[in-house]
Every structure is written in C-alpha cells, then in structure tokens.
Amino acid sequence: MPVRTLTAALIVAAVVAAPGAQSMTRPGAPESFRANGQILGAAGGAASAIHIQIDKYTSDADHAALADALKQGGNEAFVAALRKAPKIGSLKVGNRSVAIHWARAQAQGGGRRIAVATAEPVFFAGAGAVDAKPTAGYDVAVAEFTVDSTGLGKGSMAPAAKVKAGGPTGVEIEDYSGKKIELVTVSRNLPGK
Amino acid sequence: MTAMIVVWGVAVGHPSAQGKPRKQTAPETFSARLSVGAQEGRGDAYVTIRVDRYTAPKDIDVMEKALKEGGSAAFVVALKRAPIVGHIEAGNKSFSIRWAREKPSDTGRVISLVVDSPVYFVGGGVPGAKSREGFDTAVVQLTMDSSGLGEGRMAAAAKVKPGGATGVDIEAYDAEPVKLTSVKRQIS
C-alpha cells in the first residue's frame, strides 16, 4: 500500500508538538491560485486545470482541534472533525467544486508553503480502470504547494486520500492512486481575478 | 539489400509482384493516440491494436443473431464464446478482440472491433460516477485510408444493443468521446 508523506504533515505535526507555535505568517486570504495538475501512468498521462480559492486560513484553535482528532481517533475522527470545520474556500477541477475545510500557510524562504484539505475526495485517479481497487475510505483530498514572493510556485496533490497517524512526522497521507499529481505552474491570482 | 527493398516498397505503395497495390488486411497492427478531453481536463494514452485475423462471417452471424434475439446480454455471451482474433494493448494491459470486421470505403477501409471486456471507464473516477453495470465490452472504429493512415473513435466501455438504423446501437459509458488520432498501420 503506497503511503506518501506530504510536507503538509509536517505542518500538522509541528502544531501537535507545539500548539502555541507562532511560526505562521500573516494570512494572505482571501486569495486564489490556479495550477496545472499532471499525472503520468503506464499508458499515458492526464492534465487538468485546478483552481484553489482560500477565503481564510484555519485558525490555530481549529487547527489544533483537527490535529488532536487525528492523534486521538485516527482517520475517521479526523474526517468527522474536518467535515464539522467551517468551509473556508473551494478547490475546483473543471465543473467539480469541493469545499476546503482546512488551510494553512507557513513562511518558507521568501515565500510561503500552503496546504489545503477538503472533506471529500475530488476524484479517484485511476479508478476508471477495470480492475481498480475500492474507493472506500479515501475521504479527503489534500493539496500542498509553495509560492515565492511573486506568487509563483509548484506543488502536489492527493485528490483522494486517507490521513493516518504514524510515520516519522506523526501524520501520513495515503493517496488512492499511489501516484503523485504534480501541480505545475502554480500562480496566485491577482486580487479581483 | 532487404532494407532497400522495404524502403522501395514504402515509397511506391507496396506493389505486389504483379504491380498492383497489395490489399491491406490481417494480420496487421495499428498504433494510435487515444485522447479524451473533458471539462475536468485532458488525458492521452498510446495504444497498439493487433488484428491477427478478421472474424469469420459465420461467427459474425452467430453474434448478430444473439444480439437480435437476446439483446445485450446474449450478445456478450456469444462474444465471449467467439475466438480471439486480436488484442488491444494499453500500457501493461492487454484486451482481447473477438469481433473484427473490415469494410471497404471510398478512400480505404472502415474497421470495427469489439473487445470482450471494457477497456476503461472514462469518468469513472469522479465521486458518484454512474453504475458500470452492463458496460461489458469496448468498441473501436477505425477509418483508414489506402496508405494506412487514419483516425478513429472508441467507446472504452460500451453496451451493444439492438436497434438503430443498422440494427446495432452502441451506448458508451464515457462522459466524453474518446478519439483515436494519428492512427497508423505498422509496416511489417
């Protein structure tokens, strides 16, 4: 079972270790980003335009509650808590729009590392295969990307994932497909766009 | 020396010993680019279609009769009993062709192929996607010119039903049409 640890896990883990940490940068929300998602398989590849709207970032208190749910109750408790968290944005692929319930930004170099999570999967990459595995349990989607001071960057996305406690960081994200969707040419939209 | 003969053969359109163009038929192999474009994005894959032989008229008759008399379910049963006449290969997967028919056209040939299982459920990865039940085959149509180049379309998961003007109606699972571009008959 392929398990991938996103850096988003580090953000969660950092707060688990130090709930009062003041390392977060001043939120830039509301803000939006667009990205091109790409995934390659044995027979070919797929590309898609992705739009991420962040109305506000998750507060430290709400974030700590989510991190605690994961730590205490695992994926099920985390998903339940995520669904109860307020909608603070949207992640849109084509005409499918899914609400973002968690978003965090962290200063990195001259730019920021941003991670968002939805409380339902966006899509199951590879699930159209005749012998695709069951989709049950992959109840969230996670995207993570960096942007520099000009608002340009790159990242990755798990469009259907399980979040599990464990691993060296304390949090692991298991993609449904086991393959990373690359977010290339991420760019922050100009205000009003 | 052999290479020169092959090159010469390509340049002049595969003349037979009698100087007439050689008829293109099975066994033959086609390469194609498979593209599907939806609002959610775009996907491309490369497929190889190998037709070892075209289905015998008696086998076609059995399958057509099954379709006419028993509908989709009977057709699938008859299809799976028919001999394998080729394969479609995509990535590391191979699918069996049990119906292969070629018909001459003004510019070349129209080739119809039916696979005994679905190849892919396009759009099946979207949460809440429709049921896959009954989409038990895949259907390919290639339109080839006399030089061995062409285009085509594919119902990557399909129901073959009786009806329509031709007596055969294809219902595709795919939310978006799957196109085959850059179809090329391989030189053997």
Image: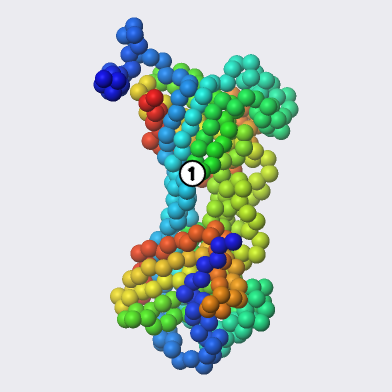
Residue occupying the point 38% across, 35% down: B182
Q: Is A124 located above or below residue B20 in the figure?
A: below
Query: Left or right: A101 with respect to B36?
Result: right
Q: Where is residue A101 in the image (x, y as percent from the top left)?
A: 56, 75
Identify the colour scheme used: rainbow
Quick one: label 1, few (<14), some, or many (20+) residues within 10 Å? few
Q: Residue at x 65, y 28 (%)?
A: B79
A44 or A159: which is nearer to us?
A44
The residue that mark 1 highlights is B91
Q: Is B19 placed above or below B72 here? A: above
Q: Is residue A135 left or right of residue A8?
A: right
Residue drawn at (34%, 6%), measured in percent from left and top? B18
Residue A88 drawn at (x, y percent) = 52, 77
Asked if residue B93 can be seen in this view, the reply is yes
Q: In which quarter of the image is residue B118?
A: top right
Residue A2 x, y percent position in the rendering: 55, 62
- Badge 1 amino acid: Gly
Subunit that carries the residue with mark 1 = B
